[in-house]
Image (tube, rainbow, N blue to C red):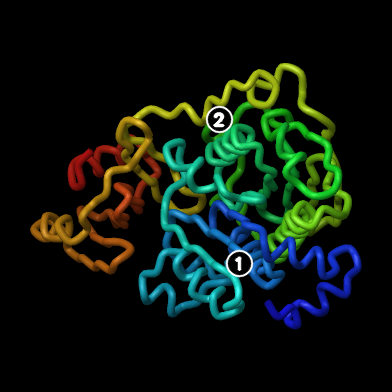
Amino acid sequence: MDLARYQRQTLFREIGQDGQERLLAATAVIVGCGATGSALANLLVRAGVGRVRIIDRDFIELNNLQRQILFDEDDIAANLPKAEAAGRKLRRVNSGIAVEAVVADVNAGNVLDLIGDATVVLDGTDNFTTRFLINDACIRLALPWVYCGVLASYGMTATFVPAGAAEKLPGERAVTGCLRCLMGDAPAPGATATCDTVGVIGPVVTLLSSIAAAEAIKLIVGRGTLNPGLLHFDLWLHEYEQFGGGGPRPGCPACDLHRLEFLEAEAGATSAALCGRNAVQVSVTAPGGRAPRLDLARLERQLAPVASRLARNEYLLRAQIDGYEFTVFPDNRAIIKGTEDENLAKGLFAKYIGG
């Protein structure tokens, strides 16, 4: 492969030609393609990571464009899911690598398959349930991963190298603790601020994503000093702090005791309120954690008598019913806009979609 496009990057001696070859041979999996995920994907595709898999469950809305750099108004008009829109743009940026767009909700039934071939996993999500699931999966598979979080003007990131992952990486890397070592249990619903209550500014996304992408590159090329703990910064006040770090915490349920509770999901309907959206995602899994597929064309016909508006493409079906907007995906999942009541959303899903 012609490395000329990476000439400025290979001139940096910590990467060099051998580091670029490692990048081209690597697979980065980005879970979530909102503000952070789209910035991470942009940086890693341009850096020449050979395979970048982008997984996202959502579609694009107008208020995303303030900070989600891969999307535009045409994507909204086309009703494109975020992963698909990102994939189309990034393939035009770098045709020499493989960009995989996966429109799916990452859950206990599919996470091991989706990230199993990764060299590194990056967090572009907006909720701690999924982050703790990634944490469990990376411990099970011995994969390094980078946690990312942004809110208002501050960001947080940490790099984790579970037991067994260090041996797979070039260079010498120490085994670290995990997300549960740093944070314990997932925060209770309503216990933390969200972008719906305090907002988020674009520059903090850019800074955090640059730090996290650099961590991924360091892991892949086997050089450079990794973030030693939880880095927290407030970009508005120019405050930077480092917390924690070191090896696994004795008694940690995940990396010490190996109780991977977030991988032990049961079949049935699950729901999650979406940050800043006045919307709830409802998904249904079968025994074993697999999602039965929905026939969107058939569902469109079923909903026609009760829906005031219907629109469908190959990725999703949109329906306006009783004042609620349903966006239904083939993986037996819907985002129901117009409520933050998860029980109500589950009821609406069961009434109009089934499950």
- Does 39 appear above or below 73? above
- Residue shown at 53% from the left, 59% from the top: 54
User: Disc 2 to disc 1, how far (Cα)?
Assistant: 27 Å
Front in this rendered view, residue 115 or 344: 115
Which of the 4 quarters of the picture holds residue 49?
A: bottom right
- Residue shown at 88% from the left, 70% from the top: 12
**Mark 1 lies on residue:** 67
Residue 314 as seen in the image, left or right of residue 166:
left
Q: Say few, some or many: other residues with alpha carbon within 10 Å of mark 1 (under 14 / 14 to 19 / 20 or more).
A: many
Question: Regarding mark 1 in the picture, which secondary structure is present there?
Answer: loop
- Residue shown at 42% from the left, 52% from the top: 104
Question: Regarding mark 2 in the picture, which secondary structure is present there?
Answer: loop
Which of the 4 quarters of the picture holds residue 311?
A: bottom left
Viewport quadrant of the N terminus: bottom right
Front in this rendered view, residue 209 or 160: 160
- Does 204 appear above or below 46? above
- Does 336 appear above or below 8? above
**Mark 2 lies on residue:** 188
User: Mark 2 or mark 1, which has the lower sequence index?
Assistant: 1
Q: Which mark is residue 245?
A: none
Q: Position of residue 169 (x, y in %)?
A: 76, 47
Q: Position of residue 214 (x, y in %)?
A: 78, 59
Q: Amino acid at mark 2?
A: Ala
Q: Are marks 2 and 1 in contact (CB under 8 Å)?
A: no
Q: Amino acid at mark 1?
A: Arg
